[in-house]
Amino acid sequence: MSLFRTYITLLFLTGFLIVSLAGCLPSSLKKPKLGLWEHPLVGKIWDVKQQVYVDQEILVDQVLASEYILLGERHDNLVHHQHQAWVIETLAKQNHQASVAFEMIDNYQGARLSKQTITSVDQLIDVLNRSKSNWQYEVRYKQLFSATFEAGFRIDAANLNSMRLMHTVKQGEDKLPTDYQQMLAKTPFSNKQFDALQLEIKKAHCNMLPEKSSRSMALGQRLRDAIMAHSLLKSKADHKVLIAGMGHVRNDRAVPLYLQTNLNSKAGDNKILSVGFIEVDDDLKNAADYSQYWGQQSLPFDIVWFTPKVERVDSCEELRKHFKDKK
């Protein structure tokens, strides 16, 4: 097997494509430890456009006024999941109807769910676990699933099966279903956008990827964003909520961009709200300073909600070890 194919196979099968831009590297099943609780930004909510801090009441108003509510997380940060659950519970308390699409549920899992009546969160997790993944549903997502169930909201699959995505990337965009091809065609990427995405992937993988691999993964990320947007566009609910990694909800080149370019003319006033749950950094005390992590002059979200930070192992060292073990 060539070096390129080896890297692509490892990255897709172990889930690194899923976690590279949007979360964390695989870890143990133990609940992660959170730090920096005393940081001055923890709990603060930043309105990026207005450049002001807002309270939860203002955020509630924005959520209720939005048709598409995109909630970007670090996958192993349970505070992010608590805040996401709060958004879902807020919609329910106001008697608003919503669907909730999860990056963590792919089309194969969605097909299984559609063939049976799911009556409990435990049953849901059991069905999801029939597919191998690194999502750790029981530890990380049970609270969020429970909030969605209790609200009476429909749970949708928002992702493409990793093996199917790997096959599609190798075959090229022209092998995609027509709906997805049309979405990509309506949202062409400039060389600058694609290069920025590729650079982000390289950095997320500690600059260990060959050039060809990082370009293929950039295409894979682009396809995932289009597919997630497509899952939201199919919903007839008053509010369409997306639970995904932060990289998928950034306004400049991810799901919000595909939504904007693919909404029909009659839906031109539909409001898209992108919320990034960002972990604080001990060296950064001002909200605007966090834009440096995103390669932008300003944060690429509508709202940023600052949270404590998960204490993680060195992800680059873990990635080096993973590749070494797989040789």
Image (cartoon, grey):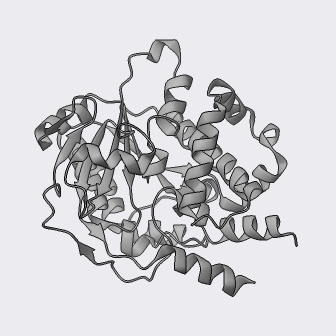
Instruction: Using the image, determine if residue 38 lies above or below residue 256.
Output: below
> Where does the image place residue 112, in percent across and percent down from the top left?
60, 60
Q: Quadrant of the C terminus?
A: bottom right
Write down the quadrant of residue 308 in the picture.
bottom left
Residue at the location (68% across, 32% down)? 179
Measured as percent of width and height from the top left, residue 89 is found at 23, 49
* Residue 268 seen from this side: yes
Residue 148 shown left or right of residue 59 in the figure: right
Q: Is residue 42 left or right of residue 121?
A: left
Percent from the top left, x then y, of residue 80? 30, 59
Image-based side of 31 in relation to 181, left or right: left
Residue at the bottom extreme of this rendering: 325
Q: Does 13 appear above or below 219?
A: below
Left or right: residue 114 compared with residue 290 = right
Give the farthest residue toward the front: 283
60 or 292, nearer to the observer: 292
Above or below 119: residue 6: below
Residue 155 in view of the camera: no
Nearest the viewer among 16 and 116 is: 16
Quarter of the picture containing the N terminus is bottom right
| Residue 99 position by quadrant | top left
Residue 29: percent from left, percent from top:
42, 82
Tell me how many marks there are. 0
Q: Residue furthest top?
A: 265
Residue depicted at 26% across the width and 28% down the height:
65
Residue 142 or 322: which is nearer the viewer? 322
Q: In the picture, residue 110 is in which quadrant?
A: bottom right
Q: Please tell me which residue is depicted at 58% across the width and 76% down the height of the picture.
A: 319
Residue closest to the eye, 161 or 323: 323
Q: Is residue 161 above or below residue 10?
A: above
